[in-house]
């Protein structure tokens, strides 16, 4: 098959978490013999910020890890007849210009030569509903939503007639345990994530900064968009700040630490239950014991208490971290169980199977879900009052 994908960026992961899953999916699809082309804007926000902070060196390092290529375009000169010639499946990510989303839909309407899906991997459907409602999905075959609750919002608000749940997953070609002697567990706790937008500041203090300070742990944080006051709080707690970290180096960092934490942003906890974002997939795939601040695994992706521990307050976070650091057997059980869950259910190979199940449904005109463990399909019947 010829698959064309329009995303914010393939080559930059600066404050761009979807790049992690995208890279894994493209690699998996190519390994199956499909032709995949990824298009990203030449003036993309993530890439501009990465280059401004670090120059072109990260892009060179990216090419040394992935055998992947991105195609740059300018909106004004983009020729969709050329770009989409011979395409079988086109996927357009929600972090794209409204005009581009509409143009691609209109092109699909004029040709009917490929299947067209919109891919949503963010919380803006609840935090910026007006902006999301403005996307013209009239000529799209449906929406891939990375959580059931987001899928349901698209259907309930009649933004689309078809929607599937398509969770993110681990790229196990990159995210895997490192057991070499150079990766001994020499340090205690690491957190990898971006601070920005004040969406989890109090949670970071409660579940990371304060427990580290109270327990006097050897800890480190990586990420971008940390304001000066955040860096000062880290320093006060004795937490080293490492700045931006290329995503493909995360497994090597995890291998040096005894534990990590996942602290989801507030919109996911309060309004979008069931969406873990990419971080737990990555941590569990690397075999590092994980402690999460509260989030509702409403779709049963994992087994809390076996794949990871949940801390419902700061005191419980302290107890969990102490237990993992002091009980090697517990740490090994969490590591083994979490990794087994990823390998059994949550790899990019699984998501590829699910994607092709959706594609086959569209091709055959069936209205029932495929067998993929994370695929959930609903269609709102046309002309039904209240749909």
Image (tube, rainbow, N blue to C red):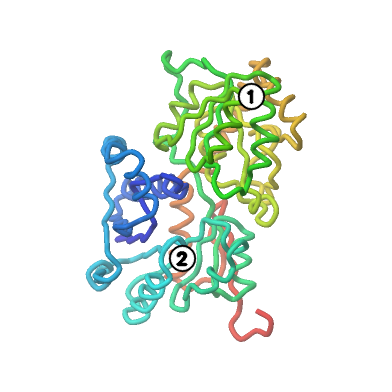
Closer to the camera in the image, 22 or 353? 22
Q: Quadrant of the rendered structure where residue 181 is? A: top left
Q: Which residue is mark 2?
A: 118
Q: Residues within 10 Å of mark 2 (few under 14, many from 20)?
A: many
The answer to whether one can see residue 343 in this image is no
* Relative side of 124 to 365, left or right: right
As displayed, is residue 249 above or below residue 87? above
Closer to the camera in the image, 317 or 90? 317
Which x, y percent locates residue 206?
70, 35
* Relative side of 224 to 298, left or right: left
User: Which residue is found at the position 32% from the left and 74% from the top?
Assistant: 113
Earlier residue among tags 2 and 1: 2
* Relative side of 154 to 7, left or right: right
Q: Nearer the viewer, mark 2 or mark 1?
A: 2
Q: Say which quadrant the N terminus sits in.
A: bottom left
Q: Residues within 10 Å of mark 1 (few under 14, many from 20)?
A: some
As displayed, is residue 246 above or below residue 46? above
Closer to the camera in the image, 321 or 51? 51
Q: Which residue is mark 1?
A: 333
As displayed, is residue 233 above or below residue 1? above
Q: Quadrant of the rendered structure where residue 87 is? A: bottom left
User: Which residue is found at the position 53% from the left and 41% from the top?
Assistant: 227
Which x, y percent locates residue 324?
66, 21
Closer to the camera in the image, 384 or 278? 278
Which x, y percent locates residue 186?
51, 15
Which x, y percent locates residue 337?
61, 30
The answer to whether one can see residue 256 in this image is yes
């Amino acid at each position: 098959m010829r698959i064309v994908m329009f995303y914010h960026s393939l080559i930059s992961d600066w404050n761009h978490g979807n790049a992690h899953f995208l890279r894994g999916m493209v690699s998996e699809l190519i390994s199956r013999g499909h032709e995949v082309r990824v298009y990203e804007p030449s003036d993309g926000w993530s890439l501009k910020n990465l280059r401004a902070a670090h120059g072109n060196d990260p892009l060179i390092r990216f090419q040394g890890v992935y055998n992947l290529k991105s195609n740059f375009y300018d909106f004004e000169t983009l020729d969709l007849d050329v770009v989409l010639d011979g395409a079988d499946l086109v996927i357009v990510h929600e972090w794209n210009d409204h005009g581009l989303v509409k143009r691609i839909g209109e092109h699909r309407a004029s040709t009917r030569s490929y299947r067209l899906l919109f891919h949503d991997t963010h919380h803006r459907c609840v935090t910026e509903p007006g902006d999301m409602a403005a996307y013209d999905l009239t000529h799209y075959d449906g929406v891939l939503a990375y959580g059931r609750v987001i899928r349901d919002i698209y259907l309930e608000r009649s933004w689309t007639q078809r929607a599937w749940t398509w969770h993110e997953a681990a790229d196990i070609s990159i995210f895997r345990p490192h057991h070499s002697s150079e990766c001994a567990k020499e340090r205690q706790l690491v957190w990898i994530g971006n601070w920005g937008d004040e969406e989890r500041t109090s949670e970071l203090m409660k579940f990371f900064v304060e427990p580290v300070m109270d327990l006097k742990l050897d800890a480190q944080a990586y990420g971008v968009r940390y304001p000066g006051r955040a860096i000062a709080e880290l320093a006060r707690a004795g937490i080293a700040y490492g700045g931006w970290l290329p995503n493909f180096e995360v497994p090597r960092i995890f291998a040096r630490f005894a534990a990590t934490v996942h602290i989801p942003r507030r919109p996911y906890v309060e309004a979008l239950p069931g969406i873990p974002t990419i971080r737990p997939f990555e941590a569990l795939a690397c075999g590092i014991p994980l402690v999460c601040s509260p989030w509702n695994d409403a779709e049963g992706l994992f087994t809390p208490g076996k794949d990871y521990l949940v801390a419902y307050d700061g005191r419980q976070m302290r107890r969990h971290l102490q237990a993992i650091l002091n009980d090697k057997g517990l740490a090994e059980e969490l590591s083994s169980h979490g990794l087994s869950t990823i390998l059994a259910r949550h790899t990019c190979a699984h998501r590829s199977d699910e994607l092709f199940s959706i594609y086959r449904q569209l091709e055959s005109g069936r209205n029932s879900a495929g067998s993929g463990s994370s695929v959930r399909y609903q269609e709102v019947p046309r002309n039904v009052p209240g749909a």
